[in-house]
Image (tube, grey):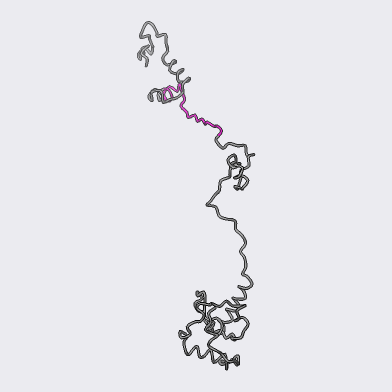
Amino acid sequence: MKSKLINYDKSTDKISLKIEDLPTVDKLQETIKKMSEEPDISKYDEKLIKEYSKAHKFIKVGIKKTFLIKKGKNFNLGNEKFSNELTFDLLINDKWETLNFSKYNYNTFGKKVPNGALHRLLCVRSQIREIFLEQGFEEMPTNNLVESSFWNFDALFQPQQHPSREAHDTFFLSYPAKANTEKFHPEYFQKVKEIHENGGYGSVGLKYKWTANEEEKIS
């Protein structure tokens, strides 16, 4: 009836041919055969696809996924070993051009190693520092590369004849050879001198003649 080949009479519920000679070609069968050979629905009318699939259910619309797999540039079976470092032999013989080097990840973190401990001398220095602080001493700026013997030795009540104040244990400057002692606080300077010679604050002193020439040296 859609192809206008027959008539339908509702009163008698009968059909009759509309034309005397039927067409020799069945367009419906031809279209379905074409669809089976070329199933790409984008090549057909959208209404026709909808009618054939939903109304008449002559065809079934589905999705067919295909994948193309081929060997890539770096294809290997896992047996190839990558070089990790560029050696002198590889450079001198130009062998590096024939090798594949493994990629470096510059964003990765380094291997964690166990934390070390303080050096024994640093431990001793920390203990000595705590002893002086407990005795009432205060820390002073230590960013000076050189300092006068007054602050290095005399202010710490180290005798001027002590062996550590000799040239074999302490480096002294030739230029300038002496510090400007006028910058020292006079009262503090005198207290240090008095304690070296006669003692004080519970100390009996070092009992020697303290001289100003020794404390002027720069070490």
User: Image point 56% across, 33% down: which residue?
Assistant: 71
Q: Nearer the viewer, residue 106 or 70?
A: 106
Check if residue 85 falls in the magenta segment.
no
Residue furthest toward the top? Answer: 20
Image quadrant where residue 93 sits = top right
Picture coordinates of residue 46, whole percent (x, y):
38, 25
Q: Give the range drawn in magenta.
A: 52-71
Check if residue 68 falls in the magenta segment.
yes
Q: Nearer the viewer, residue 54 or 35?
A: 35
User: Can you say which quadrant of the picture contains the N terminus?
Assistant: top left
User: Image point 53% across, 51% down: which residue?
Assistant: 106
Relative to 5, is 103 above or below? below
Q: Which of 128 and 174 is in front in this view?
A: 174
Picture coordinates of residue 79, whole percent (x, y):
64, 39
User: Image point 55% across, 55% down: which residue?
Assistant: 109
User: Image point 49% across, 77% down: which residue?
Assistant: 141
Residue furthest toward the front? Answer: 174
